[in-house]
Image (cartoon, helix red, strand yellow):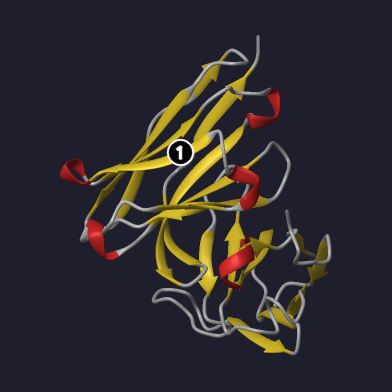
Amino acid sequence: QSALTQPPSASGSLGQSVTISCSGSSSDVGAYMYVSWYQQHPAKAPKLLIYDVSKRPSGVPDRFSGSKSGNTASLTVSGLQADDEADYYCASYAGSKNLGFFGSGTKVTVL
Amino acid sequence: QMQLVQSGSELKNPGASVKLSCKASGYTFSNHAIHWVRQAPGQGLEWMGWVNTNTGTPTYVRDFRGRFVFSLDTSVNTGYLQISSLQADDTAVYYCARQLATMSYDVWGQGTVVTVSS
């Protein structure tokens, strides 16, 4: 189903930063400001980190930031902590026909 | 606090049906659509679609048209997902989630594990 491509894995050292990409097309990521990012720990429900490309829900630390350039969205996690080790998914609206997709997911390892 | 509480795990035979529930509390149910997301074992998230909690109108992503039905009982602030003619590849965790904004979900249920096996 996924039309959004993420790298399968990414890693960073404690205290450093990691950036995850979410590559879509001009019909989804490139067309709308409706990209969101989720963190999922094993056997847990996903947690919303970013919505509308760069907005943070209340309670999400500003270590998490989102951006978009063309057809690619990005999530940056700064000041990596051990608990940031998780799977991360992007999602994007894709219009009234295709509706939307989640990305393929990226496993982040904190070294 | 705002929460979605889902029904318990299900073990079903192939060909059977199942109805999962998702009970909302701590917020005005009609203000936020309920979305459904599937996650097969070891796999990523698949968006299934949503139900408008004002009108009850469901919208299904292409891969989930036919055997999947979203419904509501607004008297008890609960959404339902019914799956018919269960197949082995329906084995997954099914999540409900509250819509915050377009394609963003800020409150999630704990998930319901559905296992389809003879």
Q: Left or right of A11: which side holds B57?
A: left
Q: Left or right of B104: which side holds B74?
A: left
Q: Is residue B101 visible?
A: yes
Dot 1 falls on which chain?
Answer: B
Location of the C terminus of chain B by quadrant is top right
Rendered view: B19 above or below B34: above
Q: Nearer the viewer, residue B99 or A79?
A: B99
Rendered view: B29 above or below B16: below
Q: Which residue is mark 1?
A: B69
Q: Nearer the viewer, residue B86 or B105?
A: B86
The residue under label 1 is which amino acid type?
A: Val
Location of the N terminus of chain B by quadrant is bottom left
Q: Nearer the viewer, residue B63 or B13?
A: B63
Q: Residues within 10 Å of mark 1 (few under 14, many from 20)?
A: some
For numbered disc 1, what is the local secondary structure?
strand
Point 22% across, 56% down: residue: B26
Place residue A97 in its image quadrant: bottom right
Q: Position of residue A64 (x, y in %)?
A: 59, 79
Point 21% across, 46% down: residue: B74
* Residue furthest out toward the bottom: A69
Q: Nearer the viewer, residue A30 or B43?
A: A30
* Residue furthest out toward the top: B118
Q: Left or right of B65: which side holds A14?
A: right
Give the total of numbered labels.
Answer: 1
Place residue B39 in its image quadrant: top right
Q: Position of residue B116 (x, y in %)?
A: 62, 20
Q: Is residue A82 visible?
A: no
Point 69% across, 36% down: residue: B41
Q: Position of residue B112 (x, y in %)?
A: 48, 34
Point 64% across, 64% down: residue: A98
